[in-house]
Image: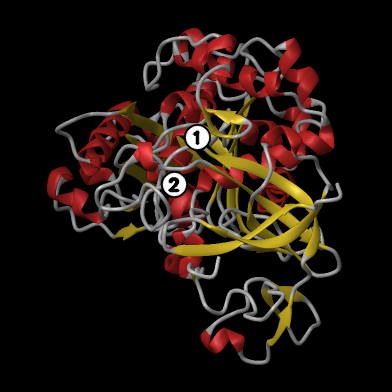
Amino acid sequence: MGALAPVDPDLWSNDGEPHLMGGRLPSGEIVFPMPQGEAAKDVEPVKLSRHGKLWSWTSQGFLPKEPYEGWGSGENEGPPDFKPFLLGYIELPGEVIVESRIVDATLEKLELGMPMEFCLAPFSDTHCTFAYRPEKSS
Amino acid sequence: MSEDVYIIGAGIHPFGRTDGRSGREQGVFAVREAMADAGLEWTDIECAYGGSAAAGSADIMVNELGLTSLPFTNVANGCATGGSALVSAQMAIASGFYDLALAVGFDKHPRGAFNAKPSDYGLPEWYGQTGMMLTTQFFALKIQRYMQLHGISRTTLGRVAEKAFKNGTITPHAWRRSPIDLDTIMNAPMINDPLTKYMFCAPAEGGVALILASEKKMKELGAHGVKIAKVAVKTRPPDSFEVFQAGVSIKEGGKPTVLASQAAFEGAGIGPEDIDVAQLQDTESGAEIMHMAENGFCKDGEQEEWLANGWSEIGGKLPVNTDGGCLACGEPIGASGLRQVYENVQQLRGRAGERQVEGAKTGYSHVYGAPGLSAVAILQS
């Protein structure tokens, strides 16, 4: 993924083992994504767990309208260039439930509560985003 | 001290697509129908509340309806626009300030799924760039989990849509007037698993107007009114799971629909068992299923039995979405919540024709929308 730019430079930590970035509120509650601007006052950035459990899922079968910037959204592109994808919510135990793309999986293989792990995935020829995939051992 | 408020006139512009007629013109059409229904002239109306999500301001309607100098308040409250207009009109009369008020909603949306800007919802740009800014995904994600937890089958999702199109065939104001069989619904292209093309409603056009009156005025006019027992509008409580949420709390929070439903039942002094006909937000098949439980009409999981036995069909123990709901009527946002109330007014006055629920005396309507709000109205004849 080295050649692809992150969709947002602050969305995950940029180190050897990237983690999604969340925020810890003064109450102790963890939120995702990390708030921006004035809303970030008193919110401590935290690295979220790379492991979680599948909370729900669906497929995206049609080309989204703007502001979608993935395959199929380009000026000379259209629905035939769109690559359907999976997405869902991953419960990061004790932290927060995050909405994420799901990769390296098929709909038939997904089950409520199955172990999932963090990874990065391309969503266009130029950019990547975060995703979760079924843990290799499962 | 607040006074009882009655709906004495109801008008609708057929939902669907009407080329060459703006959303506001469809609203004006509905207002004229409502006034004719109540036997009133525009000059009789003392105040008005209304709006649309995508078809402009309601107060400009005075250009067509007449420059009577009445106070006309624009309402912009997303999917609750109609509900909020109704509450405002009700309060204007209940307070004793006015005797006749108008609530109106209309809309006209471009074809295809709604597109929303992340910044309008306080979300970062990546949420939209990566393809998550879609309401349809939320509904699929919510029903997928619900089906896993409560044993709801895909066939039950299909049956909800089949019922909607069946009811649409006998509803003059519906958009989809042809039946669609279960196999066709189940085998249609998948939009967001588990929801196929026919399980989703589509953005559409339409207008609805209701004329509200004090009891004194209704008697004076000799009008046949339906009483507003209670209208409740609620926004989301902490830790809830709503449309457009990149992160959800691990604590299971409350639901705006449950809050609005409880407040409406409490205000009306009745319970779910007292309702004869219900219009529940059915943005897609799964929404109707979940909203049956969230509004207190059944327990989680019982919908499987309800749909298999036809209990929510016209003639069943609680007919749900008798005019085909959003699935058959489409969803012009500003008008959709008022369409549900319009349908209940027709049902309670015994004017629903082929889709009449025999002996309906108490009607319930429920709307849900972004960013997590719900409006419930209970009417009594």
Q: Return the x and y of residue B22 as percentages of the image width and height.
A: 19, 40
User: Which residue is at 27% across, 48% downward?
Assistant: B55
Q: Return the x and y of residue B308 as percentages of the image width and height.
A: 74, 13
**Horizontal arrangement in the rendering, residue A26 relative to residue B50 (left or right):** right
Residue B294 visible in this rendered orientation of the protein:
no
Q: Distance between the residues labelled 2 and 1?
A: 9 Å
What type is the residue that disc 2 sits on? Gly
Depicted A54 relative to depicted B377: above or below: below
The picture quadrant where one finds residue A97 is bottom right
Q: Return the x and y of residue B64 as percentages of the image width and height.
A: 14, 44
**Number of numbered tags placed on the structure image:** 2
What type is the residue that disc 1 sits on? Val
Which residue is disc 2 drawn over? B82
Quarter of the figure that contains the C terminus of chain B:
top right
Dot 2 and dot 1 within a common chain: yes
The picture quadrant where one finds residue B108 is top left
Q: Earlier in the sequence, mark 2 or mark 1?
A: 2
User: Helix or strand or loop: what does disc 2 sit on?
Assistant: helix
Residue B368 or A138: which is nearer the viewer? A138
Residue B230 or B280: which is nearer the viewer? B280
Residue B104 or B221: which is nearer the viewer? B104
User: Which residue is at 66% across, 81% downward?
Assistant: A15
Depicted B24 relative to depicted A6: above or below: above
Residue lying furthest front: A2
Q: Are marks 2 and 1 in contact (CB under 8 Å)?
A: yes
Which residue is disc 1 drawn over? B341
Q: How crowded is mark 2: few (under 14 residues within 10 Å), some or many (20 or more)?
A: many
